């Protein structure tokens, strides 16, 4: 029996489901994976204002941070999710993987997977279906 894991995620949370194959009933919910840091506003992530610099004309400019705090939090969450999926592969918990996430986060998530887990990705869906009901998800996966 072939098991497929379906990860539905956005930058603030994820839900992991399992399917035992077509015609085997609905998806089984395995776990919720919260990421409350993803809900923080940028002003709450960086306590300090960017530094300032003066140019040769004496005009002061704010220095921009090298990495957007929101994007950094999204990448951290994508790596956390990838660790869960990599462990599941190592434990032989599934044979196929479907990733569902809004397009920007889907790129972070796909890039965070190791090559062996990436090889199990059967399908990616670049849509934000995080708040879709469990019974409605299968129709968006076919």
Image (cartoon, rainbow, N blue to C red):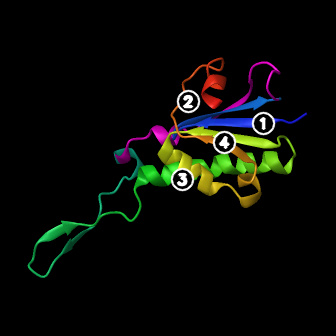
- From the image, state whether disc 3 or disc 2 is nearer to you: 2
> Tag 4 or tag 1, which sits nearer the N-term?
1
102 lies above or below 117 = above
Instruction: Estimate the spatial distance between the alpha carbons at disc 4 and disc 3, rounded to whole Å.
Output: 21 Å
Between residues 41 and 134, which one lies in front from this camera angle? 134
> Tag 1 or tag 3, which sits nearer the N-term?
1
Between residues 2 and 31, which one lies in front from this camera angle? 2
> Tag 2 or tag 1, which sits nearer the N-term?
1
The image quarter containing residue 23 is top right
Residue placed under numbered mark 3 in the picture: 75
Q: Residues within 10 Å of mark 1 (few under 14, many from 20)?
A: many
Q: Which mark is residue 4?
A: 1
- From the image, state whether disc 2 or disc 4 is nearer to you: 4
Q: Give the left or right position of residue 46, taking residue 38 as reference.
A: left
Instruction: Estimate the spatial distance between the alpha carbons at disc 1 and disc 4, rounded to whole Å.
Output: 11 Å
Q: Which mark is residue 130?
A: 2
Residue placed under numbered mark 4 in the picture: 123
The image quarter containing residue 50 is bottom left
| Residue that sits furthest to the left in the current view | 57
The answer to whether the residue labelled 3 contacts the one labelled 1, judged by CB atoms less than 8 Å apart, is no
Determine the secondary structure under disc 1: strand
Query: Is residue 37 in the magenta section?
Result: yes
Instruction: Estimate the spatial distance between the alpha carbons at disc 3 and disc 1, rounded to whole Å.
Output: 24 Å
Q: Residues within 10 Å of mark 2 (few under 14, many from 20)?
A: many
Query: Is residue 134 in the magenta section?
Result: no
Q: Which residues are magenta?
A: 21-42
């Amino acid at each position: 029996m072939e098991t497929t894991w379906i990860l539905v995620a956005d930058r603030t949370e994820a839900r992991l489901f399992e399917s035992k194959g077509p015609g085997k009933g609905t998806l089984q919910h395995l776990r919720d994976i919260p990421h409350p840091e993803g809900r923080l506003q940028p002003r709450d992530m960086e306590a300090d204002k960017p530094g300032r610099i003066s140019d040769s004309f004496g005009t002061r400019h704010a220095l921009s941070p090298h990495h957007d705090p929101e994007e950094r939090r999204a990448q951290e969450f994508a790596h956390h999710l990838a660790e869960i999926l990599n462990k599941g592969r190592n434990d032989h918990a599934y044979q196929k993987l479907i990733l569902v996430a809004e397009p920007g986060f889907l790129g972070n998530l796909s890039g965070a997977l190791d090559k062996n887990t990436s090889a199990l990705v059967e399908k990616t869906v670049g849509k934000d279906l995080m708040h879709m009901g469990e019974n409605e998800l299968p129709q968006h996966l076919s």
